[in-house]
Image (tube, rainbow, N blue to C red):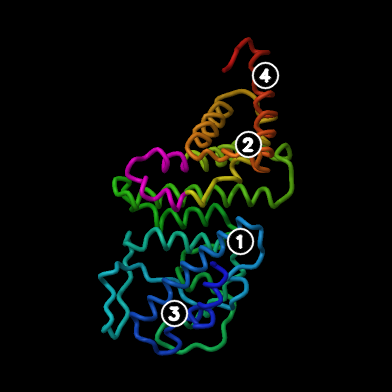
Amino acid sequence: MIGIAVRIATRLGIHRDGSQFDLPPFEAEQRRRLWWQIAALDKRIAEMTGSAITALSSAGADCRLPLNVNDTDLHPDATDPPTPYTGPTEMLFCLTRVELLIAGDPRSIRLNPATIKNPQKHSGPATPPDTNSHNDSRPSSHELDRYCSYIESVYLKRCDPKVPMHLLTLMETRSALCKLRVVDFMCRGIPTDRLNESERDTLFLTAIQMLEYDDVIYSTESLRGFLWYTEMQAPLPGYIFLLSELRQRTTGELCERAWKAICNNHDHRSLFRSIGSPMHTSFGDAALRAWDAHEEAELRLGRAIE
């Protein structure tokens, strides 16, 4: 169904920024919001099904990012676009999703710098994105330390955890940043024993935090209304990395913290509820091998574990 939505959207031209065609600011902004929601869902479906083709990689889109404004700032009769805020708005969660969507596939989007800098000016053919034209401080997603700092400073530092949508944004975004780091390491194709101790500990802690942020969402009463979305965002890369690493890291504080995060997340999500599923078989075998190594190491130290 989402593939059909992408085809309909591109035939309607929703993937092209409306300001190029002198559309009213209200209509142009609504098109941006619609397109990026379609693109984000399509990317997630592609991840779940193993497809390399997404709306961003195939549509030739040059649609600008939505403005950081509240719904009440948009009016059908407005002749000028509203001025974006620098703090959190009703678009906070959506904008972080879009940022992470682009970060996960930085070469798939084709934004025209002229369109971004001057939305009222008709632009020519789409060109590769100028990442600094959207925000002067945005680093490349390949510079993960700087990129994570950018997301924290631009979107997360002013969030109020007492506001449910802000808390959801904090937990989902930080879990996704952890995912970027874990997946980035996996894509290098090198074993963890080739890392120095500090790097290895940092990466292990990152994978733990990926599950812990997810656990906060599931265990917070005010966020229960958002679980329909979280269900699609299982922290599988964190599981894969931890269960592999726990066969070597068998004791210690971080080891215990990792097992606690895994057990809590398993209970919250019931990820492997179908015993006969390939996922249950794969993750179950990996978990048992890691637990056997943990149990054996603890017994050597004279400690019995449940």
Kindly identify which residue carries mark 4: 297
Camera-nearest label, 1 or 2: 2
Quadrant containing the N terminus is: bottom right
**Alpha carbons under labels 4 and 3: distance apart:** 59 Å
Vertical arrangement, residue 231 with respect to residue 143, above or below: above
Left or right: 304 in relation to 74: right
Quadrant containing the C terminus is: top right
**Alpha carbons under labels 1 and 2: distance apart:** 25 Å
Kindly identify which residue carries mark 1: 46
Residue 121 is situated, as x and y percent measured from the top left of the image, at 43, 88
**Alpha carbons under labels 2 and 4: distance apart:** 28 Å
Q: What residue type is labelled 3?
A: Lys
Q: Residue 117 carries which label?
A: 3
Q: Is mark 2 on a helix, strand or loop?
A: loop
**Alpha carbons under labels 1 and 3: distance apart:** 31 Å
Mark count: 4
Q: Residue 275 carries which label?
A: 2
Mark 1 or 3 closer to N-term? 1
Left or right: 286 in relation to 232: right
**Alpha carbons under labels 2 and 3: distance apart:** 54 Å
Camera-nearest label, 2 or 3: 2
Which residue is located at x 26 percent, y 84 percent?
77
Q: What element carries label 3?
A: helix
Q: Give the range drawn in magenta.
A: 213-230
Q: What residue type is labelled 1?
A: Ala
Vertical arrangement, residue 127 with respect to residue 157, above or below: below
Camera-nearest label, 4 or 1: 1
Mark 4 or 1 closer to N-term? 1
